[in-house]
Amino acid sequence: MARWQILLSEFDIVYVSQKAIKGSTIVEFLASRALEDYEPLNFDFPNEELLYVATIEERPWKMNFDGTSNAVGNGIGAVLLSPNRDHYPFTCKLDFNSMNNMAEYEACIMGIRAAIERGIRTLEVYGDSALVIYQLRGEWETRDPKLINYLKVVLGLLEEFDDITFNYIPQDEN
């Protein structure tokens, strides 16, 4: 009872037992507050055998990643972009020496794991490393033993998605 009073106190509604209220009193109250442009709810359901209705996202989640390895250090970054265009950036400094392609894979893995943690099931991945993107697509062979393990990690993570695509974008557009 206390909960209802808190939730409805702004409307000056007081709990009274059901026996004390006549149906016509409620109808009269609601009718006195009717809106001019009121449209009644339509409860007609076209398919009564249908048990579940799902909404389909118009735009999928997107993820951009980038990694760098140079004399100054090794760093990686990824940005998740929601269907509503909200940005979720992730960055990390690597504490081990790596070649640039390893940093790219590290960035991609960090972004994919962040998407999995958020329950994202459909993802478009964008990166400016042609080598990484085309290896992930299976269009280029992965020969470097250091990169083979990275590829295996990413392929293992793909099982968490209903749909994931890898797209190459030139560096100046990333």
Image (cartoon, rainbow, N blue to C red):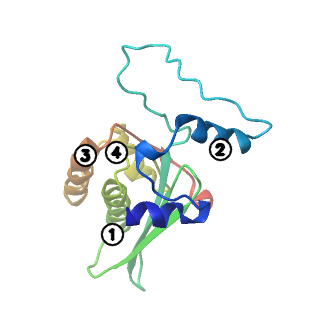
| Residue at the (60%, 29%) spot, across then down | 41
Q: Is residue 11 above or below residue 41?
A: below
List the residue tagged with mark 1. Answer: 99
Spatial separation of the CA atoms under disc 1 and disc 2: 74 Å
Q: Can residue 48 be seen from the camera position used here?
A: yes
Label 1 packing within 10 angstroms: few (<14), some (14-19), many (20+): some
Spatial separation of the CA atoms under disc 3 and disc 2: 62 Å
List the residue tagged with mark 4. Answer: 136
Give the percent coordinates (x, y) of residue 73: 39, 83
Q: Which mark is residue 155?
A: 3
- Who comes first in sequence, dot 3 or dot 2? 2
- Who comes first in sequence, dot 1 or dot 4? 1
Amino acid type at image mark 2: Phe
Instruction: Please tell me whether mark 1 sits on a helix, a strand or a loop.
Output: loop
Spatial separation of the CA atoms under disc 1 and disc 4: 18 Å
| Residue at the (62%, 57%) spot, across then down | 173
Amino acid type at image mark 3: Leu
Q: Residue furthest right?
A: 36
Spatial separation of the CA atoms under disc 3 and disc 1: 21 Å
Instruction: Please tell me whether mark 2 sits on a helix, a strand or a loop.
Output: helix
- Who comes first in sequence, dot 1 or dot 2? 2
Label 3 vs label 4, nearer the camera: 3
Give the percent coordinates (x, y) of residue 171: 56, 59
Along the viewing direction, whichever of 43 and 122 lies nearer the viewer: 43
Q: Which mark is residue 29?
A: 2
